[in-house]
Amino acid sequence: LWIGLSVAWKPVRWLALGLTIYGTLRSGQYQLHTHALVTEADAMGPTDRWGAASRYDIAFSHYGLLGVLGLQAKLTDHLRLGLSLRSPQLPLHGAATINYVGAGVNDAGTSTILTIDLEDAVFRDRQPLKATVGAAYVVPRFWGVSVDFSIYGPVGEYAIFEDDDNPDLAQNL
């Protein structure tokens, strides 16, 4: 959900400028269920096979800010060109709750049921820089056609969840 405030200005008859600042909210709840056939082995080969079920329950929310700056130039009565630049997202707050129940391996190296509850994990959301260029041909009050081209900046590789107490679980989601 993006909610924003906008301002627009037309300094000359053929040029329009605009700026919008958005507050962003991303939230969700997911469940992931898996079932796998597990084979335990010793030096003589496979000794036991059993089904390993696991379940993740994930709830998250993220708040941020970003801005969009745009301009539109009216070149003729029918031809218009536009450009917009969207800033990368400035993260304000992100939180997640992750519950895992499933197969794990204990300190002795044998399979066991594992339960992990992460109540205060950090959730990260990234919106990259975006640039859009467009052109439109318009016959006012009758029809128009436009074409846009957008390019996005890199966001890099990052862990979407982070928890200091359970770094491996949070990064493998």
Image (spheres, rainbow, N blue to C red):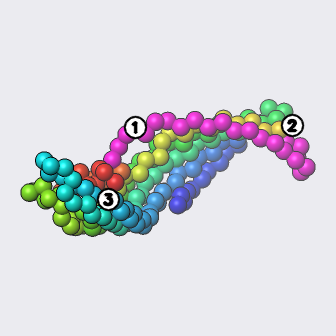
**Amino acid type assigned to the residue bearing label 1 in the image:** Gly
Q: Is residue 24 visible?
A: yes
In the image, residue 130 above or below residue 115:
above
Instruction: Give the quadrant of residue 110.
Output: bottom left
Looking at the image, residue 77 sits to the left or right of residue 63; the answer is right
Residues drawn in magenta: 138-159
Q: Which residue is drawn at 81% across and 42% down?
A: 145
> Closest to the observer: 160 or 11?
160
Number of numbered discs: 3
Can residue 119 be seen here? The reply is no
- Tell me which label, 1 or 2, sits earlier in the chain: 2
Circle number at residue 57: none
Q: Distance between the residues labelled 3 and 1?
A: 35 Å
Q: Where is residue 162 in the image (x, y as percent from the top left)?
A: 28, 53
Q: Name the residue under label 1.
A: 156
Residue 40 included in the magenta stretch of the image: no
User: Label 1 neighbourhood size at 10 Å, few (<14), some (14-19), many (20+)?
Assistant: few
Left/right of residue 168 with respect to residue 152 in the rendered view: left
Which of the pair 19/24 is nearer the observer? 24
Q: Quadrant of the C terminus?
A: bottom left
- Residue 127 at what x, y percent from top left? 47, 46
Considering every residue shown, the one lying at the far left of the view is: 108
Q: For mark 2, what is the residue?
A: 77
Q: Residue 154 colored magenta?
A: yes
